Amino acid sequence: MRFIDEVEIEVEAGDGGNGCVSFRREKFIPKGGPDGGDGGRGGDVILVGDGQKGTLLDLRYQRLYRARKGGNGAGKNRTGAASDDIMIPVPLGTEVWFLPPEGEPGEAFMGGEILSDGATLPVAKGGRGGKGNAHFTSSTNRTPRFAQPGETGESVRLKLILKMIAEVALIGLPNAGKSTMISTLSAARPKVAAYPFTTLQPHLGIMQVGDYQQIVIADIPGLVSDAHLGTGLGTRFLRHIERTKTLVHLLSLAEHRDCPALLKAYAVVSRELRLYSEKLIDREKLVVLTQADTMAKTQALELLAEFSRMPEMAGRKVLLVSSATGYGLEELKRGLADGLKLCE
């Protein structure tokens, strides 16, 4: 399935039904009166959170959503049927932006976001049904021969932006071992290969901790220099970590064999986080040296000790992990669980 995290759609709520002009005509009743019923309400358009959806793909192929018009009123004071609302399912973490009409000046504004399964957000209100002529009877007008038309339903343009909801996000340069890590910690199966940019879209996985706790982890595609400006689709990837509680920064020992190289790689991603949002830096709780199996254990442990003493690592826990052999994975799981407890 293609991962689509941004779409534009148009929605049109239903018009209200027209009121009715009618007069009573009954046997043995010499003087009838107005009995025109009201029109029915037009259908609303409502977005609803669907925990089973992970992408906006469905909305890419259907760009227009139109609710039906309410029923017209009828004689004998019968009200027209109200139209059903249109419910549009969207994945959790969807931001809803209202756009100005096509070709007209104006700025987009955020109208809300969908964060929980079943949560609803009305985006277009159906028109009210018009009143029938029975409403307009008075002492000076016993036989009103007019009724109200139904109100026009709202019509809006929307931009939907998906920001994935996860408690932990794995970040790092391309080839840092993020995809292998999430496949080891959870049942997620992203594409894994020995070349950069294997991951072209975020993935979610669920990690089991103990008998009862589950942690949702996001694998964010590799960040490169100037990602905050959009290089390598960086801003589209960075926004998926805005909602996370903890960031885990992965550094590959296969790619960076000494402390200066590790610090240089660390600085690239940290700079992009800071320039995109200062808040993200405070969420970086763990730094993980991955692919520890690519060098001798004693050498890896010495590098871990040296790197942990660097001023840049102050306040951060540094771990040594190998997804291939399982080394350090249990300590990583405990570190993730402890880090989330600190965020609560």
Image: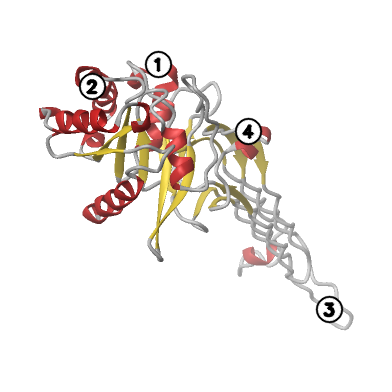
Image check: 1 left or right of 165? right
**Secondary structure under badge 3?**
loop
The residue carrying pointer 3 sits among few (fewer than 14), some (14 to 19) or many (20 or more) residues within 10 Å by Cα, namely: few
Q: CA distance from mark 3 to mark 1?
A: 82 Å
The residue carrying pointer 4 sits among few (fewer than 14), some (14 to 19) or many (20 or more) residues within 10 Å by Cα, namely: some
**Residue 65 locus on image (x, y percent):** 66, 41
For label 2, the residue is 267
Nearer the observer: mark 4 or 3; the answer is: 4
Q: Residue furthest bottom?
A: 28
Q: CA distance from mark 3 to mark 2?
A: 92 Å
For label 1, the residue is 231
Decide: is 55 above or below 92.
Answer: above
For label 4, the residue is 60
Nearer the observer: mark 4 or 2; the answer is: 2
Given contact means CB atoms under 8 Å apart, are the residues at marks 4 and 3 in contact?
no
The disc label shown at residue 282, or none: none
**Secondary structure under badge 2?**
helix
User: Which numbered disc flags the more N-terminal residue, 3 or 2?
Assistant: 3
